[in-house]
Amino acid sequence: MDIEQLISEKPLLHSDENGLPVDYSINVQVIKALNGYLKPGMHTLETGSGHSTIVFANNGTHHISISPYADEQLRIKQYLDGKGIGKEAIFLNGSSDQILPNAPEIPEVLDVVLIDGAHRFPFACIDFHYTEQKIPVGGIFILDDVHMPSVRILYQFLMKEKEWELVQKVKNTAFFKRVAITQIYSDWQGQEMNSSFKKLSALKGKISKPIKKLLKR
């Protein structure tokens, strides 16, 4: 299926507060960008589901979509079946914080991960925690809605850490590539996001030592 067909058809896959089909699809430019990163045979995963799920399936990836909305998943399956694609797509129904650490269907290596599930804090961070360790060097991590405060904190973290490189930002969606394996050698002290705090703590220590000596006299 040509990706332009999905964009033009714009199927209603989500549900509003009354359970009626509605369009909450990811931005069209993001869909096109995502399409460019995918290749047949890749192992991919997303939290959330929608038009992005169809893009993954259409590219022949071994895809896993995690969502607590069964009606949403059913509509996506029906759309995929109608197009004759996505036979290998796996839909896991439930909350990502429960599924990600426990589901045997999730492989040890994930080539592309899209985080676009629950947006309330700290879900984006939880989703990252359980997936980033499976992303190899060269793998892609995609974070949607980085303008939202509860998600932006993860975006700011990734922008500082040397293991991740921002390769593209489309609207409010950031595409990161893993460029190195995370080395945990000194807990928080080894993270770039804490570098200024670390320097400040060291400076305070240098200043306080002479004062403590004076007080002891």
Image (tube, rainbow, N blue to C red):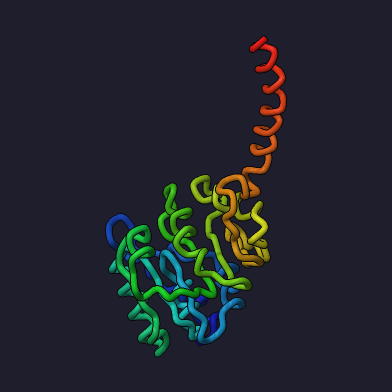
Q: Quadrant of residue 209?
A: top right
Count of numbered circles on the image: 0
- Looking at the image, can residue 208 be seen? yes
Q: Residue at x 71, y 23 (%)?
A: 207
Where residue 143 appears, as percent x and y from the top left, is 54, 60
Q: Residue at x 37, y 67 (%)?
A: 66
Where residue 205 appears, as percent x and y from the top left, is 67, 28
On screen, residue 105 above or below 156: below
Q: Nearer the viewer, residue 135 or 94?
A: 135
Which quadrant of the rendered structure holds the C terminus? top right
On screen, residue 35 above or below 147: below
Residue extending furthest top?
A: 217
Residue extending furthest front?
A: 217
On screen, residue 4 above or below 212: below
Q: Residue at x 71, y 27 (%)?
A: 206
Q: Nearer the viewer, residue 14 or 143?
A: 143
Where residue 152 appears, as percent x and y from the top left, is 55, 49
Q: Residue at x 33, y 60 (%)?
A: 98
Q: Nearer the viewer, residue 201 or 118?
A: 201
Where residue 75 appears, as percent x and y from the top left, is 33, 74
- Looking at the image, can residue 33 be seen? no
